[in-house]
Image (cartoon, rainbow, N blue to C red):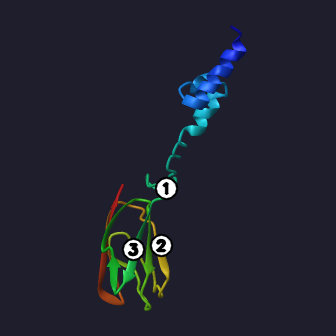
């Protein structure tokens, strides 16, 4: 029996039954590559980050004269962003640990800080002395 009719028969069987996918020509290698999910890109770290991914960021909101959340944990080199959700000013000033001094942050304003050493940082809003927070920084 000639080869061409068998190939045509296999393709017809595929069209009706789907059982002979690999036997119906085409570039199997390209097909399998395009159907595989893309591989995840490895996280990028900055040279001075101490291992924290450049994409890792932590957010703290200042609202109703509170830091939300009050306590956070980050790695050395991980960026922290405070956002003032109130219509009045707040600030972020460390009382223990690595120095932080944001100055006043008006409503809708932000402040960013990246810790450079492991340890505990206690901080307050000097405008609202009962507004306190704590950062645990790991290596």
Can you give x and y, in whole percent of width and height, for residue 94 in the image? 35, 76
Quadrant showing the N terminus = top right
Q: Earlier in the sequence, mark 3 or mark 2?
A: 3
Can you give x and y, in whole percent of width and height, for residue 118 in the image? 35, 60
Give left or right: position of 91 versus 72.
right
- Residue behind mark 3: 60
Residue at 61 percent across and 33 percent down: it is 31
The dot on residue 12 is: none
Give left or right: position of 65 versus 36.
left
Q: Earlier in the sequence, mark 2 or mark 1?
A: 1
Element class at badge 2: strand
Element class at badge 3: strand
**Nearest to the observer: residue 70 or residue 137:** 70
Give left or right: position of 124 versus 84.
left
In the figure, residue 82 lies in which quadrant?
bottom left
Classify 10 Å Cα crowding around label 1: few (below 14), some (14-19), many (20 and above). few
Quadrant showing the C terminus = bottom left
- Residue behind mark 2: 112
Classify 10 Å Cα crowding around label 3: few (below 14), some (14-19), many (20 and above). many
Classify 10 Å Cα crowding around label 2: few (below 14), some (14-19), many (20 and above). some
Give the spatial CA distance, label 1 vs label 3.
23 Å
- Residue behind mark 1: 48
């Amino acid at each position: 029996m000639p080869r061409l009719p068998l190939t045509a028969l296999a393709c017809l069987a595929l069209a009706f039954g789907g059982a002979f996918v690999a036997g119906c020509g085409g570039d199997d290698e390209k097909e399998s590559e395009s159907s595989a999910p893309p591989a995840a890109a490895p996280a990028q770290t900055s040279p001075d980050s101490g291992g924290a991914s450049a994409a890792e960021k932590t957010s703290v909101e200042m609202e109703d004269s509170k830091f939300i959340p009050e306590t956070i944990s980050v790695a050395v080199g991980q960026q922290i962003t405070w956002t003032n959700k109130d219509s009045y000013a707040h600030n972020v000033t460390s009382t223990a640990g690595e120095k932080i001094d944001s100055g006043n942050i008006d409503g809708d304003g932000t402040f960013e800080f990246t810790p450079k050493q492991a340890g505990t940082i206690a901080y307050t809003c000097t405008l609202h002395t009962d507004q306190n927070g704590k950062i645990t920084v790991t290596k």
